[in-house]
Image (cartoon, rainbow, N blue to C red):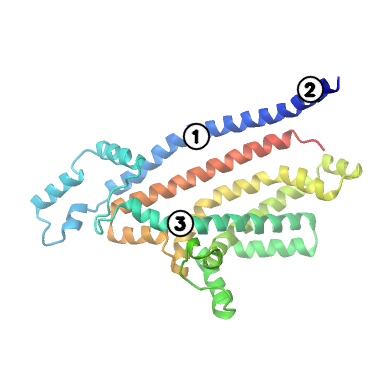
Amino acid sequence: MAVAELTAAGSALAAPRRRRTRAAASRIGGGLAVLIPILVLSSFITYSLGALSNSNPAATILGQDAATPAAVAHLDHVLGLDKPLPVQYENWLSQAVHGNLGVSYFTQIPVSQSIAQRLPVDLSIAIGAIILAVLIGGTAGTVAAVRRGGWVDRGVTLACSAVSTLPAFVVGIILVVAFAVTAHVLPANGYTGPTAGIGPWLAHIILPSLALALPVAADVARQLRTSLVSVLEQNYITGARVRGLPYRRILTRHALRNAAGPALTILGNDFPVMLAGAVAAEAVFSLPGLGQLLLEAAQTRDIPVVQGVLLVVSTFVIVINLMVNTVLGLLYRSADGVGV
């Protein structure tokens, strides 16, 4: 009898896990079904912007003296630029799927190689910025909600309002002056990869990550504070406190789980803004990232590099939004099944 009861109890506990696993798989599958058409559409727009621009790649490559009509026509044929736009895009996309994004017009370096060299810088900064935005924004929003109406709440709200109006490059300059020029505790510019040591790597990415994270953290804190105050005033929270459940458990396991959705949505929506601010942050901190590569390519009209960088950046934005939507779906489904 005891064995049968244990088996039944185990099955009862396993059933919700299986349902959550199926729900997660279903949501990820649905997200991928939407992701692929969006990626194709964004890649077509990315390619078309370069192909339909007024620049003449063949003439730019050959130079003013050698750009005769015959030489330009021959180079257009070699580069495949004399074909219709759909054919050009199809050839480019088929190569891009296999990791071949073309070759720079001027350096003759493969675009994928240039991106691979710069991408670790942006990944380090972006991951650091997301972690800092969640930690700072989540902590500030939670404290403000718990201490709502007091001086802590007003201080957090005032600080968030001030920080959210500052562009990333302004925040970066302030951080450089405070921590590099005045305090001399962190380097002002440059980048060192993790292969040189975790300490030097973190020292070089903390300020640019913080510059990108602070405006996003302010938005997350304000949104989390608003939604958490609303959740804390719900009847089931009051009932849980009356029944004597620890306040920390109520806050972390129930209130935050129900209130975190809007803040996560803000984080996903602000990610493209964070990438846009990375260009300015790279200039402030002299970082060899994708932003500077894109800026240099745009100035020289190196179209393959521009198209490759935009494709990689748009893919990151779409994938991050897919991840946020998946987490939101699982969070809401889990919250719906939570009882206090």
Q: Position of residue 66 (x, y in %)?
A: 11, 59
Which numbered disc, 1 or 3, marks the residue closer to the eye? 3
* 1 vs 2, front mark: 2
Q: Identify the image quadrant of residue 297.
A: bottom left
Question: Which mark is drawn over residue 8?
Answer: 2
Q: Is residue 304 left or right of residue 41?
A: left
- For badge 1, the amino acid type reads Leu
Kindly state the secondary structure of the residue where label 1 is placed.
Answer: helix
Q: Which mark is residue 242?
A: none
Work out whether residue 302 can be spotted. yes
- Residue 95 found in image quarter: top left
Three-letter code, disc 2: Ala
SS of the residue under disc 3: helix
Q: Residues within 10 Å of mark 2 (few under 14, many from 20)?
A: few
Q: Measured from the top left, where is residue 103 in percent x and y?
A: 27, 51
Labels 1 and 3: the sequence-earlier one: 1
Compared to residue 283, the image places residue 3 above or below, namely above
Q: Is disc 1 in contact with disc 3, using a CB cutoff of under 8 Å?
A: no
- How far apart are the alpha carbons under marks 1 and 2? 36 Å
Tell me where residue 263 appears, x and y as whole percent: 64, 49
Count of numbered circles on the image:
3
For label 1, the residue is 32
Figure check: 67 above or below 315: below
Residue drawn at x 83%, y 39% is 236
Which residue carries the number 3 mark?
120
**Please, what is the three-letter code of the amino acid marked with disc 3?**
Pro
CA gap, disc 1 and disc 3:
25 Å
2 or 3: mark nearer the eye: 2
Label 2 to label 3: alpha-carbon separation: 50 Å
* Identity of the residue drawn at 25% across and 52% down: 54
Residue at 44% x, 37% y is 38
Q: Residues within 10 Å of mark 1 (few under 14, many from 20)?
A: some
